């Protein structure tokens, strides 16, 4: 089952807004924003392919780029578990530790204020009041998440202590040790990756490491530092045990988390993780530098991360050719330029560029959309083979439902920046629950249709992402939309095992849905009649 797999990414309430230019220099208002991604919450599991589908402009590509922090996320957390926070020891960890004595005492008071807003929300007697309180709750929740959640993830139940200065002091001592070890771990990882790139077999790889005195010294330093950290951990755990009887201990301890919040990393820290997190871009023509040869394009990241000193270093060309061979590119292509290749070959170059750094996660942004059907199948099979060989995890972004069904383990459906349905691939196609997903599947061109049967389309224009509709974003195009759909945004709920849907209609009876359908149909007919009368005039 999917739930038993290791989580690689835990994304919570991710938002990405793009500010628009003000209409006038005299406009002193806050300005408008494109709501590209809105409150996306999901987990991505290690070794899976998560497909992401939706109409053009719904925010799929923006989500992929924000996940990798190519775009700074506006709000929310993106926890990455490919490494632990203690292995990386990022700067925000120390910042949170230092703030514990002065900031954390306000946490429970602010939490009480949020709960008070929620109680008011439950008893509100008008839509206007509910909307006002809902906005207030969102603002307060964001304030709490940004100010305290990473602090709690790091310290856990220790924050139940009456002496927060002591907690801060012992965690800072541990952080200093973790930071020293993180530098050693980085050097070890770099040495191992360099050695792997220069070795043709695993036996050769291990033999080279055993003969390397610098590597042995690094491992020795790491082991010594790890023992110091373990001693410090014993001291911290002993103190943690003395706090187990405290009132808030269990609640805080449950929130401890080893994930790295990518949104809080510095540019240099994020750059260090780029080797693990790569992207295959949508356009196989525009994403390649026309002035660079294939070998230089594929090797650009390898040189940028210092895994080879220069293109003249021994083993560099052999490694690039080996990577090209894995991606179905002939070695003699090494010195050719992008304009000398077909679309499929260019996409293979893009795949080789991403694969060259030996990542664990790749965002495939419309990786086959610009290719014809026969080439699409070759690239998809290549991606599948590479995934199996290298234990990769994919986020596969596309608007082609036939492709996503073949390659994906799970599928997420996005509409106007919001995730509306998430389930295993078979479930989405066999039992789509959201009206938008149902409409998308009905719109797939088929050959097995009755004579005279027309291709069904989703009626209505896509609303603007600058001023998205209130409530459910799909209600302006939904045949069954009700008053609640127009006023309240639905929550992404688990409707059956592993099947998450954000739709109010699943909470009402079929009779109520049918009444809403008839009412909407009547309203639409009246509007069309009115338009005809106006046209006649």
Image (tube, rainbow, N blue to C red):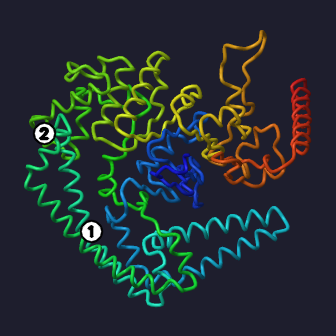
The percent coordinates of residue 35 (x first, y second) are 59, 49
Q: Residue at x 13, y 43 (%)?
A: 309
- Secondary element under disc 1, as helix, strand or loop, is helix
Q: Out of 380 and 245, give the one closest to the viewer.
A: 245
Left or right for 486, reference 30: right
Disc 2 packing (10 Å; few <14; some 14–19; many ≥20): few
Residue 508: image location, x then y, percent: 84, 49
Q: Is residue 24 left or right of residue 226?
A: right
158 over 426 or under it: above or below? below
Q: Which mark is residue 179?
A: 1
Which residue lies at the image location 16% right of the left edge and 30% below the top edge?
318
Q: CA distance from mark 2 to mark 1?
A: 30 Å
Q: Residue at x 44, y 90 (%)?
A: 163
Residue tagged by mark 2?
A: 310
Query: Going by the picture, which residue comes out furthest to the top?
Result: 451
Q: Secondary structure at mark 2?
A: loop
Report if the CB atoms under discs 2 and 1 are less than 8 Å apart. Answer: no
Does 523 sit left or right of 489 as displayed? Answer: right
In percent of width and height, residue 298 lies at: 26, 33
The relative height of residue 403 versus residue 262 in the rendered view (above or below) is above
């Amino acid at each position: 089952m999917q739930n038993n797999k290791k989580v690689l990414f835990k994304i919570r309430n991710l938002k990405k807004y793009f500010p628009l230019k003000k209409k006038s220099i005299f406009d002193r208002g806050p300005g408008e924003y494109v709501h590209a991604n809105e409150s996306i919450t999901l987990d991505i599991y290690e070794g899976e392919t998560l497909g992401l589908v939706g109409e053009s402009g719904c925010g799929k590509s923006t989500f992929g780029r924000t996940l990798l922090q190519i775009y700074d996320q506006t709000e929310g957390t993106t926890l990455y578990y490919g490494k632990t926070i203690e292995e990386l020891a990022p700067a925000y960890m120390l910042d949170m530790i230092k703030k514990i004595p002065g900031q954390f005492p306000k946490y429970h008071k602010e939490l009480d204020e949020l709960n008070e807003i929620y109680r008011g929300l439950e008893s509100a007697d008008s839509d206007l009041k509910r909307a006002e309180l809902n906005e207030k709750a969102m603002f307060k929740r964001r304030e709490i998440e940004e100010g305290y959640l990473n602090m709690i993830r790091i310290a856990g139940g220790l924050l139940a202590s009456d002496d927060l200065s002591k907690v801060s002091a012992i965690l800072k001592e541990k952080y200093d040790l973790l930071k020293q070890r993180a530098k050693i771990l980085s050097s070890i990882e770099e040495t191992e990756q360099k050695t792997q790139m220069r070795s043709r077999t695993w036996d050769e790889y291990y033999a080279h490491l055993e003969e390397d005195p610098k590597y042995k010294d690094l491992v020795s330093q790491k082991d010594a530092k790890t023992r110091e950290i373990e001693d410090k951990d014993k001291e911290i755990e002993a103190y943690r045990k003395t706090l187990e009887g405290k009132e808030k201990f269990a609640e805080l301890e449950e929130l401890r988390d080893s994930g790295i919040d990518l949104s809080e990393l510095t540019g240099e820290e994020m750059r260090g993780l780029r080797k693990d997190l790569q992207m295959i871009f949508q356009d196989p023509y525009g994403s390649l530098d026309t002035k660079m040869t294939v070998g230089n394009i594929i090797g650009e990241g390898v040189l940028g991360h210092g895994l080879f000193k220069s293109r003249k270093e021994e083993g560099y060309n052999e490694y690039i050719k080996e990577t090209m061979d894995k991606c179905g590119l002939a070695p003699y292509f090494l010195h050719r330029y992008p304009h000398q290749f077909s679309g499929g070959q260019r996409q293979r170059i893009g795949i080789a560029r991403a694969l060259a750094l030996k990542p664990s996660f790749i965002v495939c942004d419309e990786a086959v959309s610009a290719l014809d059907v026969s080439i699409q199948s070759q690239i998809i099979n290549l991606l599948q083979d590479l995934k199996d060989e290298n234990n990769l995890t994919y986020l596969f972004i596309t608007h082609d439902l036939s492709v996503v069904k073949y390659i994906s383990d799970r599928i997420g459906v996005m509409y106007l920046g919001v995730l509306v349905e998430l389930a295993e691939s078979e479930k989405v196609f066999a039992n789509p629950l959201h009206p938008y997903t149902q409409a998308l599947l009905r719109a797939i061109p088929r050959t097995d249709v009755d004579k005279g049967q027309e291709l069904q389309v989703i009626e209505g224009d896509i609303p603007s992402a600058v001023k998205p509709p209130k409530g459910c974003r799909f209600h302006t195009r939904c045949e069954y939309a009700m008053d609640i759909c127009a006023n309240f945004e639905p929550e992404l709920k688990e409707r059956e095992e592993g099947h998450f849907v954000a739709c109010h209609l699943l909470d009402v009876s079929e009779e109520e849905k049918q009444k809403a359908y008839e009412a909407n149909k009547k309203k639409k007919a009246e509007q069309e009649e009115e338009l005809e009368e106006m046209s006649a005039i």
